[in-house]
């Protein structure tokens, strides 16, 4: 596993973004782990988060794209932080774009924030996590409505490795099947468990035998290979 992935896993725990215990997800599933990207709240955290995203995006897609699109609302700071980091790390000026939940009819009118998207643009979408693929269902039509653009793929911070709504493949695989572009993550839950199981992080063991057993049981019901 790449060093930046190990650092990112510990960063999520340190930032209280990735937690372990008992949680009820929006989907109704009872999960032994929970990720909340809204817990990144300081300048230092957002700077580091942008760097991890930029490294994963560059490793996956290279620098040959034009726009990083962040769906409202959590995708907005993610896209801004990542394009800043991309410029600093790789000297490439990527435009950021995000959507409003409701179109603005005065001043900077329209549904988009930041850069517009035009014919010929190559776009990467950035999100925090994908479980059901619901948000991408809303995002793709917005991006494609802007013109003759090519969506290269989606980058999220954590792949929960769960079956999607169709219950036959993972949510990220369903995205590829449905929309024709790949979905990637900085890390997967498999990598998280591999790195944290019975290893100290921030001075404590966050995945002990009990949590590991709960995760294994969860994946028996909702997991995918």
Image (spheres, grey):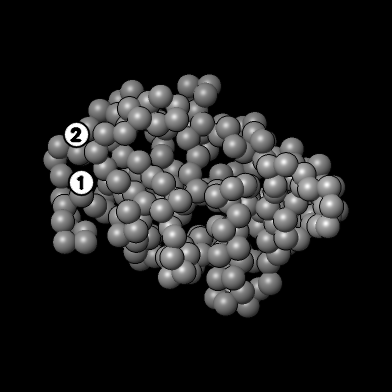
| Residue 49 position in % (x across, y down) | 46, 63
| Residue 204 position in % (x across, y down) | 15, 56
Of the numbered discs in the image, which one, if any, rests on residue 207?
Answer: 1
| Residue 133 position in % (x across, y down) | 56, 34
Q: Which residue lies at the image location 26% right of the left edge and 54% below the top edge?
A: 195
Farthest residue to the front: give it: 106
**Secondary structure of residue under mark 1:** loop
Which quarter of the image is occupied by the C terminus?
A: top left
**Secondary structure of residue under mark 2:** helix
Vertical comparison of 58 with 101: above or below: below
Quadrant of the rendered structure where residue 48 is? bottom left
- Residue 92 appears in the picture as rendered: yes
Which quarter of the image is occupied by the N terminus?
A: bottom left
| Residue 65 position in % (x across, y down) | 70, 61
- Compared across the picture, whether 155 is left or right of 161 comes to right
Residue neighbourhood size for the residue with mark 2, other residues' Cα within 10 Å, grouped as few (<14), some (14–19), many (≥20): few
Q: Which residue lies at the image location 59% right of the left edge and 70% below the top edge?
A: 84
Q: Earlier in the sequence, mark 2 or mark 1?
A: 1
Q: Which residue lies at the image location 33% right of the left edge and 44% below the top edge?
A: 190
The residue nearer to you, when weighing 208 against 97, is 97
Residue neighbourhood size for the residue with mark 1, other residues' Cα within 10 Å, grouped as few (<14), some (14–19), many (≥20): many
- Residue 180 appears in the picture as rendered: no
Q: Which residue lies at the image location 47% right of the left edge and 35% below the top edge?
A: 131
Q: Distance from label 2 to label 1 (Cα)?
A: 9 Å
The residue nearer to you, when weighing 61 against 196, is 196
Quadrant of the rendered structure where residue 219 is? top left
Q: Which residue is labeled 2 in the image?
A: 213
Vertical comparison of 202 with 26: above or below: below
């Amino acid at each position: 596993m790449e060093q930046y992935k190990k650092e990112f896993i510990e960063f999520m725990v340190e930032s209280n973004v990735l937690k372990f215990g008992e949680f009820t997800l929006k989907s109704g599933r009872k999960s032994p782990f929970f990720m909340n990207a809204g817990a990144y709240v300081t300048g230092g955290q957002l700077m580091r988060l942008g760097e991890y995203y930029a490294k994963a995006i560059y490793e996956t897609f290279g620098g040959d794209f034009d726009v990083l699109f962040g769906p409202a609302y959590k995708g907005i700071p993610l896209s801004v932080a990542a394009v800043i980091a991309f410029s600093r790390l790789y000297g490439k000026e990527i435009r950021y774009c995000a959507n409003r939940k409701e179109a603005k009819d005065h001043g900077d009118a329209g549904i988009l924030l930041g850069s517009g998207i035009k014919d010929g643009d190559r776009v990467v979408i950035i999100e925090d996590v994908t479980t059901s693929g619901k948000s991408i269902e809303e995002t793709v039509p917005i991006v494609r409505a802007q013109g003759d653009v090519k969506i290269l793929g989606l980058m999220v911070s954590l792949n929960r490795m769960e079956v999607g709504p169709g219950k036959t493949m993972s949510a990220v695989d369903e995205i590829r099947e449905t929309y024709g572009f790949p979905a990637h993550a900085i890390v997967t839950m498999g990598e998280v468990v591999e790195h944290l199981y019975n290893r100290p992080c921030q001075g404590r063991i966050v995945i002990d035998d009990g949590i590991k057993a709960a995760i294994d049981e969860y994946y028996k019901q909702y997991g995918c290979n």
